[in-house]
Image (cartoon, rainbow, N blue to C red):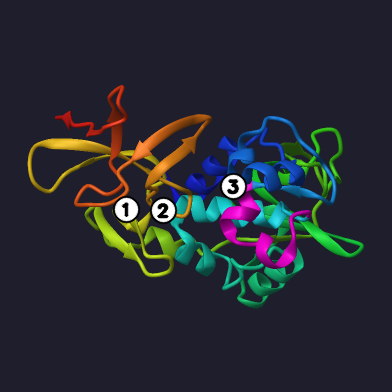
């Protein structure tokens, strides 16, 4: 699959995601992100703003750009996402990102939009952004965060939706050569300098996320590990998709999924090939 196709695929997998209540974030932290109801408005939370770091400086309300940045990060890792956004990964401002991409020569004619292009629309006080899924004779199908399935011009609808025929002002194309023209690299453990957590890197530098079955360096057996969207390996007690897991907190198998007996004693779960 092409880099642009991978980007669109990540975005499409998020269709139907709904923003969450800030009140429940205060009560439950990141675990509230598994709620299935939306609270559209100025006081909300999303995993996109949380995992891109946008919530620290800019609050939660405007997350359409956070969604785009998150999809690039999930597909290619933070460093490459920043390059594809012309150095603006840390910004949740649509006009900021658009200006940087246009200045870098990444603007293209809207009529020539292709899957994976990023389209922008201006509005009073800011803008809106979407990801091109298809171009059928100039009619664009787009995937957008913080929008509404009932309103083609919505920029604060609280959901990830697909639109056909929404109007846009600009189109920009990420430089996909930054991620496609890479030397194949073997999968290997890497050390993440910020935060001191391990992450696992696959071929072409893509960070692993979700559950990963990884073969140990010594012996013909595997362990399950869990990585968040940033590629950080989780340890200790973790709530994942509504279930609680025990991940080895330390030692040579740090992060490996564990099971316990009735007394609570931990056991490493081995998976033979």
Q: CA distance from mark 1 to mark 2?
A: 7 Å
Quadrant location of the N terminus in the rendered image: top left
Q: Is residue 149 left or right of residue 78?
A: right
Res. 141 mark:
none
Q: Is residue 118 left or right of residue 6?
A: right
Question: In the rendering, at what x and y percent does residue 151 appear?
Answer: 86, 38
Taking the view exactly as shown, the residue that stands out farthest to the top is 262
Q: Nearer the viewer, residue 62 or 221?
A: 221
Is any atom of residue 18 visible in this view? yes
Q: Quadrant of residue 118?
A: bottom right
Verify CB contact (< 8 Å) between mark 1 and mark 2: yes
Magenta stretch: residue 51 in it? yes
Q: Residue at x 27, y 51 (%)?
A: 250
Residue beneath disc 3: 115
Question: In the rendering, at what x and y percent does residue 152 appear?
Answer: 84, 41
Establish if 182 lies above or below 158: below
Establish if 259 lies above or below 203: above
Number of residues whose C-alpha sits closer than 10 Å to that of mark 3, classed few (under 14), some (14–19) or many (20 or more) = some
Mark 3 or 1: in front is 1
Question: In the rendering, at what x and y percent does residue 172 appear?
Answer: 65, 62
Number of residues whose C-alpha sits closer than 10 Å to that of mark 1, classed few (under 14), some (14–19) or many (20 or more) = many
Badge 1 element: strand
Q: CA distance from mark 2 to mark 3?
A: 26 Å
Badge 2 element: loop
Earlier sequence position, callout 1 versus callout 2:
1
Q: Is residue 122 left or right of residue 4?
A: right
Residue beneath disc 2: 231
Residue beneath disc 1: 200
Earlier sequence position, callout 3 versus callout 1:
3
Magenta stretch: residue 19 in it? no
Q: Which residues are magenta?
A: 47-61
């Amino acid at each position: 699959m092409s880099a642009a196709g991978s980007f669109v695929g990540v975005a499409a997998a998020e269709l139907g995601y709904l923003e969450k209540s800030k009140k429940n974030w205060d009560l439950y932290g990141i675990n509230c992100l598994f709620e299935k109801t939306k609270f559209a408005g100025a006081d909300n939370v999303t995993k996109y703003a949380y995992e891109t770091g946008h919530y620290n400086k800019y609050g939660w309300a405007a997350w359409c750009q956070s969604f785009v940045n998150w999809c690039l990060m999930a597909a290619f890792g933070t460093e490459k996402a920043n390059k594809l956004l012309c150095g603006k990964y840390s910004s949740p401002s649509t006009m900021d990102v658009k200006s940087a991409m246009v200045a870098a020569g990444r603007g293209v004619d809207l009529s020539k939009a292709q899957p994976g292009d990023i389209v922008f629309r201006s509005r009073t006080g800011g803008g809106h952004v979407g990801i091109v899924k298809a171009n059928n004779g100039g009619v664009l199908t787009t995937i957008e965060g913080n929008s509404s399935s009932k309103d083609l011009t919505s920029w604060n609808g609280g959901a990830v939706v697909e639109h056909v025929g929404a109007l846009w002002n600009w189109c920009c194309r990420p430089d996909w050569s930054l991620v496609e023209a890479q030397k194949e690299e073997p999968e290997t453990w890497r050390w993440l300098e910020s935060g001191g957590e391990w992450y696992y890197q696959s071929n072409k530098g893509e960070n692993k996320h979700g559950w990963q079955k990884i073969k140990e360096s010594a012996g013909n057996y595997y362990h399950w590990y869990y990585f968040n969207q940033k590629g950080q390996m989780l340890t200790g007690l973790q709530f994942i998709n509504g279930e609680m897991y025990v991940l080895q907190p330390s030692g040579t198998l740090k992060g490996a999924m564990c099971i316990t007996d009735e007394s609570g004693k931990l056991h490493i779960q081995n998976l033979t090939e």
